[in-house]
Image (tube, helix red, strand yellow):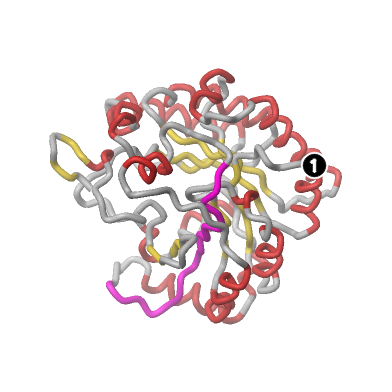
């Protein structure tokens, strides 16, 4: 782990990527970070600082039909699927808080960010505040022109969602995806990073652990190294509908997970890849640090500490022997 990644992990301000030290010289943001640092371990109900990171959902429109997606829950249980693109005029309502914010990530949430035609206007707005800015994407709508613009607009990092290195499994998990196209997009990002000598720009891959792919992660790291990405961000599948319960990472035996995690950490270190792993299993006393540094903003303006809890229902992955475990 690099010095920058160690600083990042200590402050709890990033995932697998490196902190942008230059950005913390902004006075109000620096003061906010210092107050956060002083109080971050006390788990206060009311905190004396602003959020450190913003996750902003800018679209609920998607061109994929992934069987495990939360969109399936909305179609089947919650009375209809919202399909909206966030407008720049609404994003501008965040202006009062932005001088205090360290980083903003434009996320897919229920959709794909590039479905929003105002995507680049929104990026440019956040960059006016010298905020570290990144985006998550399934890569399917990204063109070479969009890649060039990513560098032109000085985006700091991108994260492409890839849940396995196996073509057939990838296209089954991400219904509507084309494996070769995704690989080509990641390679183009690396090509332009090298050509523009953009040393601080980072390329990441998002890997969602499932019961049917968790063993793939070891060989997946070889693909990550081959693609010359900078970090791999791993999360666990949030099971939204009953038919997908058996895909939950929670059903995997804890010892198997521990073995895989140990091998993954060792290999990522050997390959010099940034890595963020989820917790091994939910526990009664598990405290998520997102609650004290993070704010998620959904398409309709709803604000929540956790990006996964946009509804008041229990998630299937929280349940063991009919008891809520986290």
Q: Residue furthest front?
A: 79
Quadrant of res 317: top left
**From the viewer's perspective, is 143 left or right of 237?**
right
Residue 283 x/y as whole percent: 23, 45
Q: Report how many numbered discs are placed on residues in the image.
A: 1
Task: Estimate how packed mark 1 is, as few (under 14), some (14 to 19) or many (20 or more) residues with alpha carbons within 10 Å.
Answer: few
Residue 71 x/y as whole percent: 43, 43
Residue 149 x/y as whole percent: 78, 53
Which residue position holds label 1?
144
Residue pictured at 52% horizontal, 42% vertical: 233
Q: Secondary structure at mark 1?
A: helix
- In magenta stretch: residue 302: no
Residue pictured at 50% horizontal, 23% vertical: 172
**Which residues, given as a range, are shown in magenta?**
45-62
Residue 205 x/y as whole percent: 58, 39
**From the viewer's perspective, is 155 left or right of 193?**
left
Q: Is residue 27 visible?
A: yes
Q: Is residue 29 visible?
A: no
The foreground one among 174 and 75 is 75
Magenta-drawn stretch, dominant element (helix, strand or loop): loop
The foreground one among 97 and 85 is 85
- In magenta stretch: residue 52: yes
For the N terminus, which image quadrant? Answer: top right
């Amino acid at each position: 782990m690099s010095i920058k990644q160690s600083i990042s992990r200590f402050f709890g301000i990033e995932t697998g990527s490196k902190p942008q030290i230059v950005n913390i010289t902004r006075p109000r943001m620096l003061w906010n970070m210092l107050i956060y640092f002083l109080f971050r371990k006390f788990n206060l109900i009311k905190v004396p600082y602003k959020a450190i990171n913003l996750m902003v959902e800018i679209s609920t429109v998607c061109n994929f039909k992934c069987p495990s997606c939360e969109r399936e829950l909305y179609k089947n249980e919650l009375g209809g699927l919202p399909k909206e693109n966030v407008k720049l005029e609404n994003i501008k309502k965040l202006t009062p808080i932005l001088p205090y914010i360290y980083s903003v990530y434009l996320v897919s949430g229920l959709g794909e960010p590039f479905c929003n035609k105002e995507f680049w206007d929104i990026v440019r707005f956040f960059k006016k505040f010298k905020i570290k800015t990144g985006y998550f994407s399934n890569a399917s709508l990204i063109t070479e022109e969009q890649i060039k613009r990513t560098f032109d607009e000085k985006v700091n990092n991108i994260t492409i969602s890839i849940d396995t290195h196996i073509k057939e499994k990838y296209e089954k998990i991400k219904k509507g995806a084309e494996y070769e196209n995704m690989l080509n997009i990641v390679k183009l990002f690396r090509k332009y990073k090298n050509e523009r000598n953009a040393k601080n720009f980072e390329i990441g891959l998002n890997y969602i652990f499932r019961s049917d792919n968790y063993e793939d992660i070891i060989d997946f790291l070889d693909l990550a190294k081959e693609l010359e990405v900078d970090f791999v961000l791993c999360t666990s599948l949030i099971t939204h509908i009953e038919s997908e319960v058996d895909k939950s990472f929670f059903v995997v035996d804890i010892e198997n997970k521990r073995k895989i995690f140990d091998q993954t950490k060792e290999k990522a270190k050997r390959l010099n890849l940034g890595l963020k792993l989820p917790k091994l299993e939910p526990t009664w006393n598990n405290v998520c640090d997102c609650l004290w540094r993070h704010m998620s903003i959904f398409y309709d303006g709803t604000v929540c500490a956790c990006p996964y809890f946009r509804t008041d229902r229990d998630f299937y992955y929280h349940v063991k022997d009919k008891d809520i475990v986290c």
